[in-house]
Amino acid sequence: MLAARVSLVAIPCNLLAEFALAPATVLGFLALATAPVAMPAAKALAWCAGRPTEWLAQVARTGAALPGAGVDWPGGWTGAATLGAATAAALVLGRRLLHHPWWSAACALFLLLLVVQPRPLTRAVTGWPPPGWRMVMCDVGQGDALVLAAGEGSGVVVDAGPDPVLVDRCLRSLDVDRVPLVVLTHFHADHVAGLPGVLRGREVGGIGTTTYEEPADQAAFVRRIAAAEDIPVTHAVAGEERRTGDLSWEVVWPPPGAHPAAEGPNDASVAMLVRTAGLRLLLLGDLEPPSQSALARAPVADRLTDVDVLKVAHHGSAYQSPALIRRASPRLALISTGRDNTYGHPSPTTITALTADGATVLRTDRDGALAVTGTVTGKHPLAVTRHGGLP
């Protein structure tokens, strides 16, 4: 009734956490009681309480990161009543299964495979991730998170989405454990709040950000997380070119020495022209029309024509520059947006403008995560694999 999702790991996770709950609670309250009269003793007690508390947090994170940690379920009273009926039926069936050991073992194995989803089995059943993927737009709800293939087990991450669990799950599904660079196009929470999920258990070479560090609290959050992991943070400006393996990119916005933020942080988004396997991808962050129009007139604009893939700016909002869309003239336009979001993203006018220019438009709210594969030349043309979208 409270959330349109049913956890498959809550009960085993709570059982694993049970023995740590009492010491964490008792030691925590002792620290509170001792602090007014003996702060050194209170600190020692708090340190002791931290050990079982860390275990609680680790169990929660590990359980939430499992690919099959939960299943979507109807919300509201209807969903609650349906879940109650399904639970009662499962109890009756479960009692009967106890008399059939082999069927019980088979059901337990099926549930385990559903939760863990081993990668070889998942790839064989779902085709995800597709072989030779070049870019993946993760399904992180109302936000942005892209992964650019940079070699075996390696990927450049562009934005981290709003939720650490969702972006971590996406990277795990792609077997990415090395991240040469995380590019945060700007500091809105739907692009940076998931950063801890990108860093979790991965080797990260650096973080590149826009020069306009607003909102200040989110910029401070990024620097605090980076400092805790000893990861260098640099600013990305137009003209910067970088390469890792077969992946190369050029920063085309924002211009150096200026803060194009008349409309706020969105207009200072880092925009990139990416080249991989002969494909050209234009990633626009959340640029608004003023900066999009300026980019369409910039000297670099000649290199932004007829791109293969366009990451549509600002989740496909209505605020787009027709001049930049015409200049880019993408074959494929991808929109990252959340299901049933309150912003009206993506805008029908934006989708119409893209399709009128000949682009195929796909969106994460309906199509799930999107993996771009193929090359410009050769026997594997440009293609997209969808994962987890609506039926």
Image (cartoon, rainbow, N blue to C red):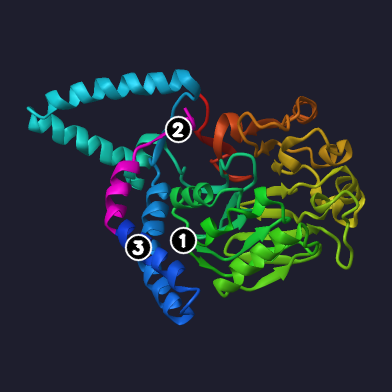
Q: Is residue 204 left or right of residue 282?
A: left
Q: Which residues are magenta?
A: 1-19
Residue 3 falls within the magenta-colored stretch: yes
Task: Indicate the position of residue 381 as horizontal and vertical percent values.
Answer: 58, 39
The earlier-in-sequence mark between 2 and 3 is: 2
Can you identify the residue that label 3 sits on? 26
Label 2: which secondary element: strand
Residue placed most toward the observer, 175 or 336: 336
Do tag 2 and tag 3 residues touch (Cβ < 8 Å)? no
Residue 206 shows in this picture = no
In the image, which disc is placed on residue 271?
none
Q: Between residues 147 and 64, which one lies in front from this camera angle?
A: 64
Residue type pointed to by label 1: Asp
The residue that disc 1 covers is 177
Work out whether mark 1 precedes mark 2 in sequence or the reverse, and give the earlier one. Answer: 2
Q: Position of residue 258 (x, y in %)?
A: 89, 64
The answer to which of 101 and 381 lies nearer the viewer is 101
Magenta stretch contains residue 9: yes
Is disc 2 surrounded by few (<14), some (14 to 19) or many (20+) residues within 10 Å? some
Pointer 3 or 1: first along the chain: 3
Residue drawn at (83%, 36%) of the image:
319
Residue tagged 2: 5
Could you give the CA–CA distance between mark 2 and mark 3, rounded to whole angstroms? Answer: 32 Å
Q: Secondary structure at mark 3?
A: helix
Q: Secondary structure at mark 1?
A: loop
Instruction: Say which of 196 and 52 sits in front.
Output: 52
View extreme (bottom): residue: 40
Q: Residue 370's image quarter?
A: top right
The mark tally for this picture is 3
- Residue 234 in sight: yes
Point out residue 89 in the picture as x, y percentages from the top left corner.
25, 20
Residue 54 position in % (x across, y down)? 40, 63
